[in-house]
Image (spheres, coloured by chain):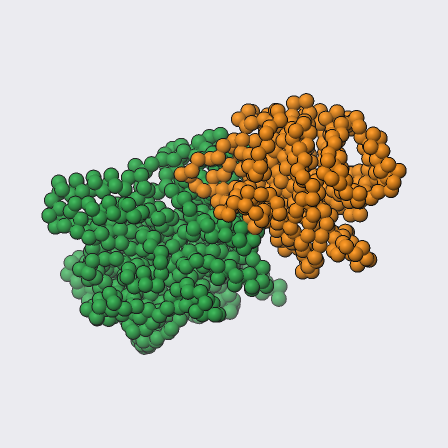
Chain colours: A green, B orange
Amino acid sequence: MQLRKNNRALLYRSSWRYYLKRPLHLLFSVLGVALGVALVVGIDMASDSARQGFSLSSQSITGKASHRIISSEYVLPESIYVQLRNELGLRKVAPLIKQTVQFNTHDNTRVDVQLIGLDPFSEAEIRTWQQGIMESLPNGGLQRLLTEANTILVEAGFLKQYHLRVGDQISLTLTKQENEQEHQLLIIGFFNAPETFQTQLKNWLISDISSVQELLNLQGAVSQIDLLLDADNAGKIEQIKQFLPEGVQLVKVDEHAKAITRLSQSFELNLIALSFLGLLVAMFLIYNTMMFSVVHRRDLLARMRVLGVSRKELFQLVLVEAFFIALLATGAGLIMGIGLAHILLYFVTRTINDLYYVLQVTQLHWSYIILFKALALGVGATLLSALMPAFEAAYTRPVMALQRSNLENKINRWSHWFVLPGLLACLLVYWLLKVQVDDQNSGMLIGFASVFISIAAFICLLPFMSRYLLALLAIVMKHLFKLPGKIAVNNIVRSFSRSIVAIAALTIAVSSALGIGIMVESFRFTVDDWLSGYLKADYFISSQNNNTSSQVTALLEPFDKQLISNLSQLSGLDYLSSVQKVRFFIDGQYHHLNVFDIPMKSFSAFHFKEGNASSAQKAWLDEDAVIISEPYAYRHGLSVGDNIYLPVNQIGKNPEKNILHQAFKVVGIYYHYGSEQGVINMNRTTYDRHWTSKKLNTLGLYLSSDILHDQRKREQFEKQLQVLISGKSLHFISKQNLHKKSLIIFDRTFKITNVLKLLVILVSFVGILTALMAIELERSREFAILRATGLTGKQLSILVYIETLTMGIVAAVLAMPMGIVLAYLLIEVINYRSFGWSIQYILPWSEFAMAGGLAILAALLAAVYPAWHLSRTRPALALRGE
Amino acid sequence: MKFQRLQWFVLLTFSYCACDASSPLPMNSISMKNILGEQDSGQENHFKQALKPRAFQFPRDHLAHQAYKTEWWYLSGNINTDSSNKSASTRKFAYQFTLFRFALHPEKISLNKSAWRSSNIYMAHAALTDVKNHKVYQRERFSRDGLALAGAGKNENGFLRFWLNDWQMQSMLSDQLFPLTLVIEDEEFSLNLQLEPVKPLVLQGNQGLSQKSSRHASYYYSYTRLASKGNIRVGNKTYEVSGDSWFDREWSTSSLGENQQGWDWFALHLDDGSDLMIYQMRKKDGVKDIFSSGILVDSQGNHEMLQAQEFQLKAGEFWQSPVSGIRYPISWDILIPKKNIKLTVSTLVKQQEWSKAGGFSFNYWEGSIEVNGSKNQQPISGSGYLEMTGYD
């Protein structure tokens, strides 16, 4: 017993010494796993922090409120609040205006901050942190807040961060645009937020609702009204609902918050899928390094077997080694992941802000779940990847240990065995693509599953394909590089079990990058193309605060009758079109309606996927008809001919809800990439039949052709336009610039994808580097013989470079079809299933060139160290080592 | 007479520091310090001062006086169920409603701005005392006057209206204060009363100018007895009630004198039909200030002023509030030798206290009292309201 224990100790000591002697090897093993773990942890933490940030900010806004009154027009008349208090006698009710604005710091950078307008007298019952504010007000602070314009209170952390004091003025601009008017705000006091909300409240400038209305030019309106209602008091809730005017809804706060977070769900799921792709590549890496360590010690292991170490013990030994490497790597991965999360958080929040909702997160959210996930993934993936090497170690037979060809023979046979499962996996993917699911989330899961299964299928087919490709390359290389070319390719084939892993890792990474690249390029092309057809007016005028992601979109009613009449009298104007954006909160979700008043020639902006353009146009003009965007149709399972029911306030018609749901017939489904949630479009006259509000969000100006093509006249027109809208917090933009701007936002959104693409490539680079080192170092004896027989160090390096070049070429060639398949899956399955967007499929040559170049470059770079190392090794030493 | 205004200044200048973060502050208390600013901020200079008697004009003077910094409308009364028949089943209740106005500016803030911009902050205190059950229901509310969330003015029919959200006093005839309805709705209680004066208005002090210290005075008038009837709700039980109420009006800009600590104010309805109001200003050493005074109104409505030296007040039993820890004298002996009046005032419900510790903006005791004693050697009784401040 004692003996066995000693044996084991000896065994582990030998492994310890093995790694200690090869710190670089250990480093790469750890680095591989660590990078994979870091990728998952980074993405997980970043999206988790974003979610947590949203939840905290929503909690700090919501406070104790149970319900919220929101409007289909984004802002509510403040008179509703007065009526709730004065007529319905509600006490636990508080109005709020919330708007993201830009704070100009001392060093002239602009920082997003939330401008919050509230009524100090109604806050106590709703937002709990408010008491702290009241308590910390300086003498007469409340009076100043109420009577002096632009007075604000800030959180203590804000003062500290920007080195400000009470009594200082800060400068704000309402939007990010250049040359925007600056507003000076006076800090009249500060407060200490409760710890939970500190990060959120630190970015809040709190002011009286009057100052905020004046600053935003929002007299008469508030963003929302929060209420604390007794859930049991159904009568009261019903009373409030009945009392609210058209387009204004009472919703439950938690449902409302859920609806908002749901917006970015698809985006987050996509991120997670990407992180798993990274982990998959990392697994190759681990397999590679573990296998390398086993193979490298083959003779040592064989000797151990001779000395009586059992198979089980060797098997355990490799797994225990893997376990410790995994622990070390997971630790490193966690640290790297946190660093990565910091970077990703910036991109994630920016994308969410661009596309979904206002979110400010600067703090990473840490939870033990992340630690467990990292451990499970790091250790799990490592042990899984180490299984094969462990088996190999266990089945090392003393006699055969030195016969390399033994394993290679096996692998050669295996490469055929894998073909069948690979083909079966292909069939499975084909079948999965045919599966129709109603539920969007399971649709996405199936989409991701098919991506991973197709990668698995490809991995199965890879050895088989590589063999034939290598056979072909053997001829090419021999032709190109004569004997070294021949030797190099033969080397790869002879150590196929090693080289195939390196090739596979590189292929997967490059094809993922290629697939993502094709997808993004196709997407961009589609959006670009769509914008060219969709933007019809020559100029667009909208509110400066118009930010699609903002909850408070068009805050005000910027287009008064006078302005519209002035605009329509502009000389050279052909048509003044308008869009009104309305939203309905139905069954826990927002439904967005765009009301169009457009010239009929612009109807062609709707490029139909389903439905007949001419009959749709007729129905659009005369009937209760709507045209819906592709994502909307997809999300709600609608086709042409179906009905959409929208709430029309007509008290008394429906005794249950007092809301009549009017049916609108879907007469067309058109391509639209402006909104992930999808939109319903309705003609102005149709809308006016059922609703009364006319709060326009965007105006479109169509120029007569003589002005349109005359640069001088156009400039004059722009000048006139500027004069008309000046001082109204409006801005205009030409069709061309709007097109450009949209594409800029598009590109920004995909920056995060690029970052992840790079990371995947980095992981694979480390992978191929270790694989190559394994190969090259393993064969140092062969190289020594070559050296001894007259090959110079330089020639040996060239040999190594040719080998890796060949492997790079194999990976590049194989990555092409795989990349196309992945792009297809990403576009057709993930993009369509997550977002409901049809994307035109393009194959940009630049992406292929980049992918090919990348594979070859990575392979060549990976050869630098082994080539240098081998060329310096003295043949005698290497030979003696055997 | 209603002095709470003065009390806030007492609080903000003397006692605010005693109640800061260390006490378990209620959610809804708004510090007066924040509303009114420093006493010595010089703000008062922009407001008009009550310096000499004015020619009152009604109904104009029933409404708000923006040029003065503080103002209030005060109602209190003892109301009972079925008071004609004093059977055992009679339930005694008492109520208080005060609407305060604090000016943020001596002028109305100009239009063309946000409607939330306000010139005044209104505060209301409403209380109902259930004598039988020894329960007191109190509620405090604040609002700005912007957006007509609170105010004192005329509605479209010319009815006078004093309101804070859905709580309101409203006249039932145009351009007249009475008859007046009081409507207070709350979760725990409600008041719905109709009030009509049985005696004419009396100007307090010197033709309505009430001197509070050598430098400070206010405009002050009262309706000392209002026949009151209507219904009240306690929980979900409603009671028909009737009784007598007291109405006070006061406005000014200045505050307590430097040496003054607080006051004790009595408003009594005696059962011979006469009404007695007495207040004493207490100096910091506890001694009655010479600016204390009173008024006696007979059943016909004739009134007679009482000077400080013409009455004596003696505190009897003290009660310590379990909520705030403050000790209040809740029984008093009132002596007016020249009128041969000897009265003892006591309360059936001791905890009629408003305190910061209890969730309100400042500390005072205001509640229903019983009166017993003699007038011209004849036994006399009655009821009324007592207000005590400055007992921190």
Q: Position of residue B37 (x, y in %)?
A: 57, 31
**From the viewer's perspective, is residue B279 above or below residue A830?**
above
Q: Residue at x 67, y 54 (%)?
A: B230
Quadrant location of the C terminus of chain A in the rendered image: bottom left
- Looking at the image, the residue that sits furthest to the front is B300
Asked whether, in this view, residue B58 is left or right of residue B336, the answer is left
Measured along the vertical axis of the image, is residue B11 above or below residue A846?
Answer: above
Q: Is residue A478 left or right of residue A555?
A: left
Taking A844 as reference, is B365 above or below it? above
Residue located at (61% from left, 45% from top): B178
Is any part of residue A202 visible from this angle? no
Along the horizontal axis of the image, is A875 left or right of A144? Answer: left
Q: Position of residue B332 (x, y in %)?
A: 82, 37
**Foreground of the two, A33 or B121:** B121
Relative side of A205 to A632, left or right: right
The quarter of the picture where residue A817 lies is bottom left
Which corner quadrant of the image does residue B219 belong to? top right
Which of the two residues, A836 or B226, is positioned nearer the viewer here?
B226
Identify which residue is drawn at 12% across, 50% down: A705
The one of A847 and A261 positioned closer to us in this rendering: A261
Quadrant for the N terminus of chain A in the image: bottom right
Is residue A319 in sight in this rendering? Answer: yes
Residue drawn at x 16%, y 45% is A571
Identity of the residue furthest to the right in this view: B377
Residue A560 position within the rendered picture, expressed as x and y whole percent measured from the top left: 31, 47
Q: How many marks?
A: 0
Depth order, front residue of A212/A481: A212
Residue A437: image location, x then y, percent: 37, 74
